[in-house]
Amino acid sequence: MNQGEAVSGDNSFGRPNRANLVGFLGDSGARASELFDVSRNELALNPIQETPLETATGEAVFALCNRQARAVSHASAQDGSFVALVGNAYGIPDSSTLLNMWLAEGMGAFSNLDFHGFVAAWNAASKELVLVRDRFGVESGYYATTEHGVLFSDDQETLIRMGVDHTIDPAAIDAFLVADYFPSPLTPYKAIKKVAPGGCVRIAGGALQVSSYANCLSVEPVSSDEALDKMRLVVETSISRMWPEEGDAGLLLSGGIDSAMLAVGISRFVEQPIKAFTFRYEEYEGHLNESGAARIVADHLGIPHEDIRVGPHQMIDDLDTAVAQYGEPFNWGLHSYRLGPIAEQGISTVFSGSGADGTDIAKRHAAAYRFNALPGVVRKAMRTAVRQARPLGLSRQQKAEWVTRRVNGLAELFSPDSELSQIRRGALYRDAELAEYGSRLLESVYAAAATELSAEGRSAMTVMDKRFTGSEGGGTWNRAFTRGNGMEGRYPFKDIAYFTLGLGTVGVNGKDLLRQLALEYLPDEVANAPKVAQEMPVGHWIRGPLADIVRARLADLPAGMSAIFDPAGVRAAVDSHVAGSTDNGWLIISLLTMESWFRQQPRRG
């Protein structure tokens, strides 16, 4: 579906205009008009409808889009029905088609829709508003229930500007430290909820209902030989559908199998020109630098290739801007924030291999759910066994990969909580019991997802495949950072055809199929290379050139953060890492992005 004209807006730190879409359904009195005026005037939003529509039930509904940041595809009917999409829909010509599908099929329109986006759709005849998020959670969507009605947006800051309570949820903050992201429906705020991947929020007759429209994945068993041919077609078709209608395209090339096969798909299957970019980390020499492997791929395929250099001081200097673009504390995605040099070359669309690990990540989440259902004594004993089985000196991501893929007998024992235990987290807080509250909250997220399967008799694996595909914790930053630099991100492996093929292939997962296909187009050293870590050498930098800077930055915590965290505990975590006693590199990054985010809170108030 063609997007409206995208205009690059003010991408500076603390910019006031963040939302692409904002709306309200509730009381039709003065409060609705007030919210409408705030949205339209202070946030510079262009109305999808010029005035709030009063419904037969005495409610008002409106939706507005911000063309200063990015265009939103939308269409309205004469009776006031509308559909608005932040993101991209593939395989349909325009937003009017999507509106007709919505009015004719209801939620069935989205169940069958191949899209990456957040949708708000209003049916004036049935007086029904739905908020829909794509299956892979590429876009984010938020909502808040107030005394006057429900406010929604693709941005949390906008909801706060419109008066939503911005009290911090300490348990959600702890869950973030465990999971490295805020899994739906969690956000840093108590009053704001996030729509789940494949989820729907339906508001009708004054009632709000949260459900899933993408529970059932049609997964058919496929032999490995047949799957290889299908995989080639899936890669080609997905890239073709997502190829931009205009502008130049770039590829984030790590040298790993995912991005390498995207390079193959673009240059060999679709035969389109593209330039590849690889992050090069300065003041560091080691396996995290990907330039060598990436250049082998680029040279083999004849693709122009360029390094984007990132140093430790540059990372710290740009941290506030990265947090402002992302909108909340984050962790591992820091490795892909520096996209400005790509935009400066006139690139308008950036392709990424994010999503190819979806089935593997989902399996780890399913294992975590099963693990957390075991008695506490058993969990403790198994965690000890897993830790003793792990090789030393590996990052958390590598440990998880090693356990789940190399030690089959221990794969089901992996739990996010085992990596950053309650004892270690409790030492960071003023109230050590917060670590227990956060663990319970995270476990409730898994349990809530699992209840979706009970009525249909499906397995926990199927639910986790849908809900926790790594999009929220392994890809939303790509969208935030590409958009923050005035570009559009595309993710061919976040494709339902790829995902179901990987799940259905007998005896082989999606990544194995990619490797088999890669052998036909790439050298063996690339096709069968170990997994690329794709992370900054933050631990190395914090022990070296950033040690004093990090200590100074975390020595004076902002008020909101210091109400939760014990400065002595934070200092001890930094000192332990610098001394080499523990590997707290990514924990410290979480604390740094949290410190930056808390300092930005007054601007959100």
Image (cartoon, rainbow, N blue to C red):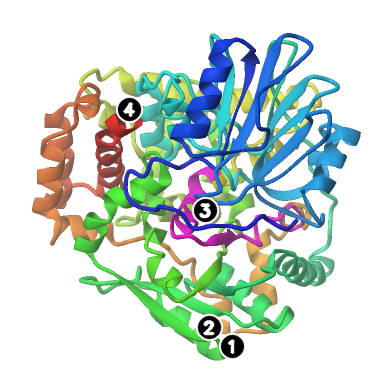
Tag on residue 422? Answer: 4
* Number of other residues with Cα within 10 Å of mark 4, as a class: few under 14, some 14 to 19, many 20 or more: many
Residue 341 appears in view: yes
Secondary structure beneath label 4: helix
The residue tagged 3 is 479
Q: Nearer the viewer, mark 3 or mark 1?
A: 3
- The boundaries of the magenta stretch are 472-499
Secondary structure beneath label 3: helix
Residue 588 appears left or right of 531: left
Among the two numbered marks 3 and 4 on one chain, the one whose residue lies closer to the N terminus: 4
Amino acid type of disc 2?
Val
Alpha-carbon span between mark 1 and mark 4: 48 Å
Name above or below for residue 177 compared with residue 436: below
Q: Nearer the viewer, mark 3 or mark 2?
A: 3
The residue tagged 1 is 301
What quarter of the picture does the C terminus occupy?
A: top left
